[in-house]
Amino acid sequence: MHRKMKLLLGAFAVSSVTAFAQPYPTKPIRLLIGFAPGGGTDVAARVLTQHLTEKFGQPNVIDYRPGAGGTVGNALAAKATPDGYTWLMIATGPHVIAPSYYRSLPYDPFRDYAAIAMVSISPYLLVVHPSVDAKTVPELVAWLRKRTTPAAYSTAGAGTPSHLASELFKMMLKVEMTHVRYKDAAPALMDVIGGQVQLGFSDIIISGPHLASGRLRALATSGSTRTPLAPELPTVAESGLPGFEGLVWYGLLGPKGMPDAVVRQVNAEVSRLLGLAEVRERYATLGATPTPGTPADFSGQIKRDYDKWAKVIQSGGIRQE
């Protein structure tokens, strides 16, 4: 009996080691997205998912959980089992703006997640209706200041990156503007084109086609450097507001406690993919620049942007609407 027990224990030990030594992944990966299909987060994720499925031999099953500005997806990811089989494709808004903007959230952007990889970053275009008497940022500033009633600016919703970029612009200029919020970026842009509002910070991918037609005028981009997608446009920062920057980024997170080895493996593969010409070209068509880097790089970006937007929200007295 003693000999049989030893044999059974030995067999169990071998099988346990074999199980834990199995290559990752061995089953489908759930990719949470806190927005509806077709939006920027979804499109940015899909550029990667096909390649990752081919590389890992397991599908990325996208689980859309829209609601509350993307925070529903964040909350689900925070509570997921940290075994490496649940990822979250995150955007700037619900992760580094929402924690300061909303009165309470069921997650903490630092305590509840493991940073895997930053994926891409996109600037906005500062656009105006053609009736606005301005072709440069200084001219827009002069136009705003001489108005007897505040100009209106549109955003994709309260607490979104376009809202905070607009508030930062307003605060740095020390001018009054009226916020007109929409449920998405497309209707926000359509009302600038229609003249119902005068200006806004808009995604390059949806505003670009309207520039050539003359239905819209772009004055600057919101990044710290000029974008290769519109190199002729200066940045807001170089147009008289040094230090201004308002960007949208996308990245991959996992729940806190996700195995370090899995984090490193996924990060290495994402970084490799982001270096491929075909992937870079695809992101360029979306108005984005791939941003390969380490998990520590992504954590640093999260902390910097969290601190920045918390200060803007506090200084501007911006509250949940």
Image (cartoon, rainbow, N blue to C red):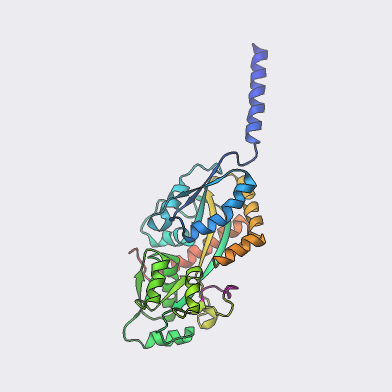
**The magenta stretch spans residue 228:** yes
Q: Is residue 52 above or below residue 192?
A: above
Q: Quadrant of the C terminus?
A: bottom left
Residue 165 screen position, x and y as percent:
45, 71
Residue 148 screen position, x and y as percent:
32, 86
Residue depicted at x 39% and y 62%: 101
Residue depicted at x 66% and y 62%: 277
Residue 4 screen position, x and y as percent:
65, 14
Characterize the magenta stretch by its predominant secondary structure: loop
Residue depicted at x 62% and y 64%: 281
Residue at the front extreme, as displayed = 213
Q: Left of 129 or right of it: where is 47?
A: right
Observer able to see residue 169: yes
Observer able to see residue 251: no
Q: Quadrant of the N terminus?
A: top right
Q: Quadrant of residue 190?
A: bottom left
Instruction: Provide the residue span drawn in magenta.
Output: 221-229
**The magenta stretch spans residue 170:** no
Q: Quadrant of residue 157?
A: bottom left
Looking at the image, how many numbered discs can be counted on the residues?
Answer: 0
Residue depicted at x 62% and y 60%: 279
Residue at the top extreme, as displayed = 1
